[in-house]
Image: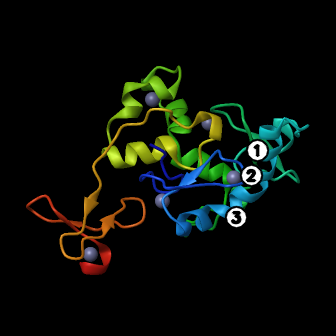
Amino acid sequence: MAICLVCAHPALLQCSGCHRVAYCSQEHQRAAWDKHKRLCKILQKIERGEPSPDPKSYCGLCGKTEGPLRTTDCCGKTVCDDYEKYVMFTFSYNSCSRNHDRYTRCHYHHNERSHGGGDWKTCSECRGGYEPELTTWYATNRFNFLDDIHPNPPTFTPKYCKKCGKVVKKIEDSGSSLPDGSVLCNACM
Ligand SMILES: [Zn+2]
Ligand SMILES: [Zn+2]
Ligand SMILES: [Zn+2]
Ligand SMILES: [Zn+2]
Ligand SMILES: [Zn+2]
Ligand SMILES: [Zn+2]
């Protein structure tokens, strides 16, 4: 089953441009589009077997070619050198470098000496520790380089709001856990 690039819940819509990414909803497709549109064009060229730019010449997360670009310490991929774009405490996803460093297992695993190196995708520490929904999100979200998205992430059971029945997605709705194990979404809290 395809997984939404934004929230890690089951995806129903595939990107009709590159066929490489999928989303649960148009809302999440729109949320990712700004950083996917250029990359999508490059992926389409690759898919059609047309000459495509050298991977070192564009950001592997957003496809931007006009730098500044840098190489990640964790996986040696090319990414926008754009930490200065991020404004403290906004928690926005505007910086490609920060997104990869903060929201992927790739960088986390690289920094955690106790994980013993090697590939994060086969690291047992990286597969546990958090709630499965978040573990899955870290392993499959759009801040991973597409070739590195975990092919076989842990599965999780979505939680539904006890009051309105809406699915409560961890990554966008902190919700509230009730003593009986059920949850309420932010709107119903
Ligand atoms: Zn989604
Ligand atoms: Zn696409
Ligand atoms: Zn970028
Ligand atoms: Zn990395
Ligand atoms: Zn690890
Ligand atoms: Zn609710």
Say above or below: 15 vs 167.
above
Q: Which mark is residue 155?
A: none
Judge left or right: residue 135 versus residue 158: right
Q: Secondary structure at mark 2?
A: helix
Q: Which residue is denoted by mark 2 in the rendering?
A: 40
The location of residue 101, given as percent across then percent down, is: 59, 45
Disc 2 and disc 1: Cα gap in Å? Answer: 5 Å
User: What amino acid type is highlighted by mark number 2?
Assistant: Cys
Check the image and report above or below for 118 versus 106: above
Q: Nearer the viewer, mark 2 or mark 3?
A: 2
Residue matched to label 3: 34
Q: Residue at x 41, y 33 (%)?
A: 126
Residue appearing at x 24%, y 76% in the figure? 164
Q: Residues within 10 Å of mark 1 (few under 14, many from 20)?
A: some
Callout 2: 10 Å neighbours few (<14), some, many (20+)?
A: many
Q: Is residue 48 left or right of residue 82?
A: right
- Of labels 3 and 1, earlier in sequence is 3
Question: Is disc 1 placed on a helix, strand or loop?
Answer: helix
Quadrant in the picture for residue 163: bottom left
Does 94 sit above or below residue 67?
below
Q: Which residue is mark 1?
A: 43
The answer to whether the residues at label 2 and label 1 have Cβ atoms under 8 Å apart is: yes
Spatial CA span between label 2 and label 3: 11 Å
Helix, strand or loop at mark 3: helix
Residue 81 in view = no
Q: Indicate yes or no: mark 1 CB to ligand 2 under 8 Å.
A: yes
Whether residue 102 sits left or right of residue 96 in the image: it is: left
Which quadrant does the N terminus fall into? top left
Q: Can you tell which quarter of the image residue 183 is in?
A: bottom left
**Circle 3: residue type:** Asp
CB atoms at circles 3 and 1 under 8 Å apart?
Answer: no
